[in-house]
Image (cartoon, helix red, strand yellow):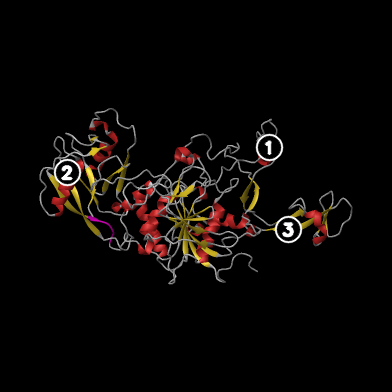
Amino acid sequence: MALRPLYSNKKIRIAHLAGPNATIQNTPPLVTSNKAREAHGLPLLTDVEGMPSRFDPLRPQKLAVPVTVYVEQFSAHPLEKDVAELYAAPDGYVDAAGNFSPERTSDADKPVYRIELKPEDGYYPMPYMARQADGSAWETDGTGPRVERAKSRQPFMPDGRRTFDEVDRLGVDGMGLGNAISDVAEVDFYRLAPSAGYTKGLAAAERTDEGEGDIAPEVSGTDFFPYRPAHLNASPPRMSLARITNMAQDILGSGDYDGAIWTQGSPRVEETCYWLSLALDVTVPVCCNASQRYHGQISNDGPKNLADSTDWIASKVWADDQGRNRVGVVMVQDQRVFAAREVTKVDARPGGYVAAGGHGGILGAGGGGTGSVLRYVPAMKHTWQSEVNVSKLPASVTGIRGREGGIETIEVAVKDGDGRLLDTAIPKVSIVKDASYIEDDYDSDPAQEVDTIAFMEQAEERPAVRFRAGGPQSLRQGGCVVEVAHPVEGGLFRFPGRQCRARHHRRFRHLRRPVHRRLKPDLGQGAHPVDAVHHEVRHAAAGQRPAQADQGRGRRDGRETRALSGGVRYALTVQAD
């Protein structure tokens, strides 16, 4: 008998894609319980008055052998006994000595249920009994403060299986039911850029993810990306977007799945969400999930987000009349379904997500007692509609690169022979922030623009780089500079008809354009960099050698723009599309 919203009498298939720095896959430190401390003569955990803590926290663990337990009747809720007449008789009674009998032998006997617990039942919450190798108690992740990786345990899960199992096993929905995911879906687990790894490797027979062969010893910062312990934090580099894109495209393009769930850290998931919505050429839904509290922590929000994503995929409210996803990649958080383009985290607190831009962005609701609903369909292109998805990107592009005396054209590979995105094709987008009262004096020296100069110098030998300025007053708009509005909720570009996107979304949109090449104009006194770049690009496109840059100077707020003009040579990068 199904009590949840019934979308189909057949389970859907979902691919879980494990991403980096994922709090939704992170767990609180495993701290040795007082039960273990007492048994081994270790100092107990105490309250503020120095007395032993009232309870031991229970952590999900597996039984090694079957065990029979006796549970006191009417102990699940304080008012069960108030309507005792509504209940069937207990399984038996336990006397003061702990002996079980099917019949009551004394008024002091306790009515009980007799339960046989088996290892195959799944995880049971129990006190944590483990100690360190030297016999001391575990107090945090490592053997001590700020220890090396080899002396610290990993709190993150290596793939999604354990997390999903615990959600089904220990999570209870509003109707009192468990198995919120497995009642609806079969889930396979993939490690695209996971938050934890096997530092000593793993035999193929022990793998819980989809993959073949043994897992070789893995390295933090290369194979997996945690943020705890804090001093061992590692985030994925830009090139990892190619791996994520290629693996997700292969998995979801196989036709084996009805949808996918991507999990990542809450401050970063919005970026990958938007990237995948631009990059993937798939027609199935992809939901992004995060959590703002550890898995298993008080009031952790991750399990509900995972269950709501499962409901969203199963509901098919996202489907057009041909069964294709019409809303693109979405983020499902706190029962709200956000469009990938608009979602942003504006506050480091639970519920800190908003739809940026002031023009919608919340498409509907995921899960809930009545099931998922879709209220709005985005007008922007996405996934299979996207003009920059991995299938539509060219195998290579012609770019430009600065050389002594001018610029040259070069061929830059974007995909390999199998059509997979190359990690070298992921360009760097540098952001420089402008602000009010940022000038040092009334006659600012271009040499004071140290951050801008540093970006340009770093870009000198990198063809796939683009320079970018943040803030509508930072530079005069041109082919090598993009002016953007401040990314506040409800904010708009100053340019008519352009909707504001959050800063990271604009950055990722430009990352999807791999035709970004640098040039280095030799400017004379008084020349404006943007004018010089325009001049050289025009001649390069026509196959001509560029002449001396046009002389000119921009104006801002009634005075000359001197911050990036004058007798200084700048290496600016441009977009050659």
Which circle, 1 or 2, is nearer the viewer?
A: 2
* Location of mark 3 (residue): 115
| Disc with the residue nearer the chain's start (3 vs 2) | 3
In the image, is 276 to the left or to the right of 548?
right
Distance from the alpha carbon under mark 3 to that under mark 2: 81 Å
In the image, is 137 to the left or to the right of 233?
right
**Predominant secondary structure, magenta span:** loop
User: Which residue is pictured at 56% across the width and 62% down the height?
Assistant: 371
Task: Give the crowd class for mark 3: few <14, some 14-19, many >=20 residues within 10 Å.
Answer: few
Mark 1 and mark 3 in contact? Answer it, CB < 8 Å: no
- Specify whether residue 152 is in view: yes
User: Which residue is pictured at 38% across the width and 54% down the height?
Assistant: 275
Element type at mark 1: loop
Which percent across, then down, holds residue 138?
58, 39
**Kind of residue at badge 2:** Ala
* Location of mark 2 (residue): 532
Which percent across, then down, holds residue 237?
36, 47
Which circle, 3 or 2, is nearer the viewer?
A: 2
- Specify whether residue 20 is in view: no
* Location of mark 1 (residue): 53
**Kind of residue at badge 1:** Ser
| Disc with the residue nearer the chain's start (1 vs 2) | 1
Of residue 203 and residue 248, the one placed in the foreground of this image is 248
| Disc with the residue nearer the chain's start (1 vs 3) | 1
Q: Which residues lie in the magenta part?
A: 412-416
The answer to which image quadrant residue 320 occupies is bottom left
